[in-house]
Image (spheres, grey):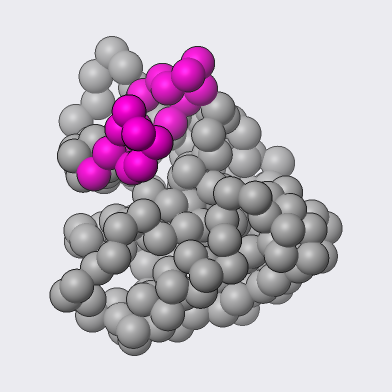
Amino acid sequence: MADEQTHIFFKPGQSDTAPILMLHGTGGDEQDLSKIASYLLPTSPQLGIRGRLIENGQTRYFNHTADGSFDLNSLNSETDWLLETIDTYTEQYHLDQEKMIVVGYSNGANVAAYAWLTKRPRFKKAVLFHPMLLTPTVDLPDLSKISIWGSHGEQDPIVSKTNFDELMQSLTGTHADVSIFEHEQSHNINEPELVSAKAWVTAHIS
């Protein structure tokens, strides 16, 4: 449930348009992806939720351990918190999670993918900019009703090609509908990437 550490951004839109849930990258905030969301679906309501953790002065959805690896306990508990917070605010703003499209970048994209592989989130579609696999999943869930667009940069210093491919293979193994966009740049979001994401969103809105 929401608490004093919760920072959200809400932008109203047309009630008959799929709402967008925005999950920012490391160091971002709840409004960071609003312009991208507006580009993808101009009339959609927007809900942004800020990661409540601070690590090295930067906001995050989960922490690392002292040796730099992912803190899986933090990842698990903070994902639970995020999903509960989504429930709280989608109910408050009368947003339909079944029609919601997640727009996540980096840290935010990571936690969305992790939620699908390990939890039971209600959202069914996502645009994931530069996501990575955080921990291998032994027992893959059935995500046959899930649609995912994911992107990767060939020169990305944060997400290796191997890791990105492992994540996409895991998601494909769940029977999710997976679309991939790759470019030759780094961890940045570029114009061709946005054009591809918009075309995918337009084709997948109901």
**Which residue is pictured at 27% across the width and 38% down the height?**
71
Q: Position of residue 29 (x, y in %)?
A: 54, 27
* Looking at the image, residue 147 lies above or below residue 188: below
Name the quadrant containing residue 4. top left
**Which residue is pictured at 24% across the width and 36% down the height?**
74
* Residue 85 located left or right of residue 166: left
Q: Position of residue 172 (x, y in %)?
A: 40, 82
* Looking at the image, residue 52 lies above or below residue 87: above
One can see residue 74 in this view = yes
Q: Which residues make up the magenta segment?
A: 53-72
Q: Is residue 56 magenta?
A: yes
Q: Position of residue 67 (x, y in %)?
A: 35, 34
One can see residue 201 in this view = no
Q: Is residue 100 or residue 66 the one in the foreground?
A: 66
Q: Position of residue 134 (x, y in %)?
A: 36, 55
**Which residue is pictured at 44% across the width and 73% down the height?**
166
* Looking at the image, residue 117 lies above or below residue 174: above
Q: Is residue 40 magenta?
A: no
**Which residue is pictured at 63% across the width and 39% down the height?**
34
* Residue 194 located left or right of residue 24: right
Q: Is residue 60 or residue 71 the one in the foreground?
A: 71
Main SS class of the magenta portion in the image: loop
The N terminus, quarter of image? top left
